[in-house]
Structure formats: C-alpha cells, structure tokens
Image: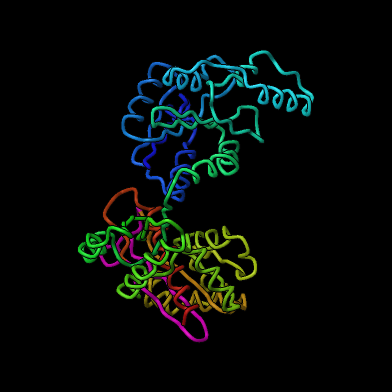
Amino acid sequence: MNAEILCVGTELLLGDIVNTNATYLAKELASCGINCYCQTVVGDNPQRLRECLEQALNRADMVITTGGLGPTYDDLTKETVAEYFGRDMVLHQDTLDRMRGFFARIQRPMTKNNEKQAMMPKDAVIFFNDRGTAPGLAVEGGGKTVILLPGPPREMTAMFQSGVRPYLEQRSKTVLVSHSIHLIGVGESQVEQQLRDFMLEHQNPTIAPYAKEGEVMLRVTASAPTREEADELIWPVVEDIRGQYDKYVYGVDVGTLQNALVIALKEKNLTVCTAESCTGGLISQRITQIPGSSGVFHCGVCAYANDIKTALLGVTQSTLETHGAVSEQCALEMARGARRISGADIGISTTGIAGPDGGTETKPVGLVYVAVSSRWYERALELRLGRGYGDERESIRNAAASNALALALKAVTK
C-alpha cells in the first residue's frame, strides 16, 4: 500500500510553523508497512487543495491530511474531501455531544461555528479527539482512502496512536522495520563507494546511507509480515556492515553519540567530565541533554583563556610555550586536569581554532585536538575540520564535539 501526506495550512507555506506533522507521519506509516513516496503542503485554498488531493490520489492508494478541520470559514479540508468522493455532509451526533461536553467541562460557551466540526461526510469513519474539539475521520471509496487529522501536533499524534494506527494495521499485510547503524570518522561518499555493490545486491532489506554533521548513518530496512521476520532479515546485514566498519561504528539504534555515551557509561558504572576550549561547553551541553546523565556526568570546565588552562586544569607553562594551546600535549593535559579536579573516571578535552579568525599557515582554521584520559586508556587526536568556507565556525565546533564524544565512547569500551 502506498500513501501520500498532504499537510494543509498557509502558515506552513509562510514558514511560521515547522511541519513536524509530516516527519511524524512518515515514520509512523513506515512502521505500519505503508510506503510514502510523496509529501505535499498546500495553503488554505479550496481550489488548490482539491488539485493537490486529486494529484495525490492519482499517485497513491491513501492520502493522510493534517489541518483544516477547525471551526473557521477557511477550514475546508472535510468539505473538499466530501466533494471529491461525492458525499453529502451530515451531522454526527456523537461528535456534537462530545464537543458540548468538552465546553461544559472547561466552563466556556460553545459558539455556533463549532457545530461545523460535527458535520461529516456520509459514512465516514470517525476518530475521536481526546485533546481538542476537531475529530479526525477516514473516507473510503473507489479503492482510495483519505484520512483527515487535526493540525495541532499534540492532537494529531494522540489521535494517530489511539485511532488511526489500529485502523491502518487492519489494512496492511506487512510491516516495515528499520535499524540504524551510526558511524563517525568516515565520509558518506567513501561508505557509499565501498558498499555500493553490497547495497545494490540487497533489495529486502535495503541499505541507505544518510550524511549527518560529521557522521554517517546507514539505515537497513526490511519488509515482512511481522517485526520478528523483518528483524531476521535485517540483523545479518547489520552484523556484516559492523564487521566491515568496526572502527567507525559507534552504535546501532542509539540515536546520537551523546546518548550512546551515556548508555555505555551507565552500563560500566563510569563517570565522565569535560575540559573544553574551542567547543565552549558544547560537549557538556550535549551530554546533559540526555535524561539520566546526572548519574554519569561530574562537571564541565570551559577553559578558553590560557591562564585558566594553567591555573585550573594544570596545563604547564612549558607546554603552552613549546607546543601552544592548540596542540596534542595541551589537549592531554586538559583532559587529565579535568579528571583530577572532578574525580571522574574519564576526562574529555578539546582545543583548537574554530575561526573564522586566528588561523596561521602552520595552525589553520579547523585544526582541533581532542583528547581522552582515564586510568586505562589515554589518547589525543589531531583533526583537520576546516573546509575553507567563511561560515564554518559552528560546523567545526560540532564536529570537534562529536569526535570528542566518540573518543570518550572508545575509552569506555576499552
């Protein structure tokens, strides 16, 4: 079964609202075994909405819409779909009663225009809204289905889980299951070139590379009648790829580097601390994004100035004079110093030139050293993260933080 997502709302076209609904629905459709090949956004205009609906139904068996179900004059999604299927709009008494009860509970008068939300295309399947007034619905006819959901994400997601997912699962004979392999230290083009024949050979499961900032993700996806059967197809491929890229893979289905690190630290009952210069606290911020990180994260020191590196972290004056603040030696001493003052098991550090100024011929913009220090493993890496662009400061900082997190994760595994 193929589906298309059609999001309705002029505010989406103007960029006033980020279209998170499409992202959510695409993932949910995939998990239901339904392919989604197109997504469309259209404003609150009945003629253009009708054109987009017709185009979508020419391409797909099912269209899922969000938005345009409210009580105002420009909320016309239901009416447009009813017209397409040749259905009359009829009063759905249960919906009207639920709306009256909702307004009574919040002690507000229900205005006349709200009754519009209780008018439904004849024979529609209704999905009640437990977080708002506008119900969702499904209209079927001629081998096609249109599912209409409210626009507010809080209402839409709850309705999808409670009503739409069971409705779809009854109509889909397969599930799509994906597992993600996360790599760092290797480029997307290199991975694609090396795995090209391998990817072409596999049609179920499929293998698709995705470039992230400083990282690569390989998504392995299989279609099968059940999740268990899909996993049986996927895991041998995942293990094959892990074997080929062992030194680059930092996890499977871990989401982010920082999440993988926090999970690994908890499993080994270890703690971590940071000493950051060019990343300015970014590593600490990423680690503490993760729920439960308070159990593994001791402290973060943002030591931008050299005298702070010396006074607080114990970087020696001779190191700064001989090698400079941007050096392997300085990075190692920073990591050791953070571990000393915090008592953590693992210290992470960064020092470098994020730009756009400050670079020299011998130490250009993008030169970064990351280091990790522990009782059992200590290492520093030299990174050349600059690409010659004038606006790459943040990309350098982010890549430096990612490499430092990956190095810390390696220390945990050691």
Q: Is residue 66 above or below residue 222?
A: above
Is 294 magenta? The answer is: no
Residue 175 vertical position relative to residue 51 in the rendered view, above or below: below
Taking 172 as reference, is 199 above or below it? Answer: below
Q: Coloured how?
A: rainbow
Residue ranking furthest to the bottom: 376
Front residue of 361 and 230: 230
Percent x, y of residue 142: 39, 28
- Looking at the image, residue 335 sits to the left or right of residue 297; the answer is left
Q: Is residue 411 left or right of residue 369?
A: right
- Front residue (pair 333, 205): 205
Residue 184 placement (x, y as % from top left): 36, 66
Residue 366, picture quadrant: bottom left
Q: In which quadrant of the rendered image does the N terminus lie?
A: top left
- State yes or no: residue 372 in magenta: yes
**How many numbered badges does the structure rendering display?**
0
Q: In front: 195, or 13? A: 195
Q: Tell me the quarter of the picture where residue 322 sits.
A: bottom left
- The percent position of residue 19, horizontal first and vertical second, equals 46, 36
Q: Residue at x 59, y 75 (%)?
A: 271
Is residue 158 left or right of 326 when viewed as pictured? right
394 or 413, nearer to the observer: 413
Q: Which residues are magenta?
A: 356-383
Residue 270 is situated, as x and y percent measured from the top left of the image, at: 58, 77
Q: Residue at x 46, y 29 (%)?
A: 140
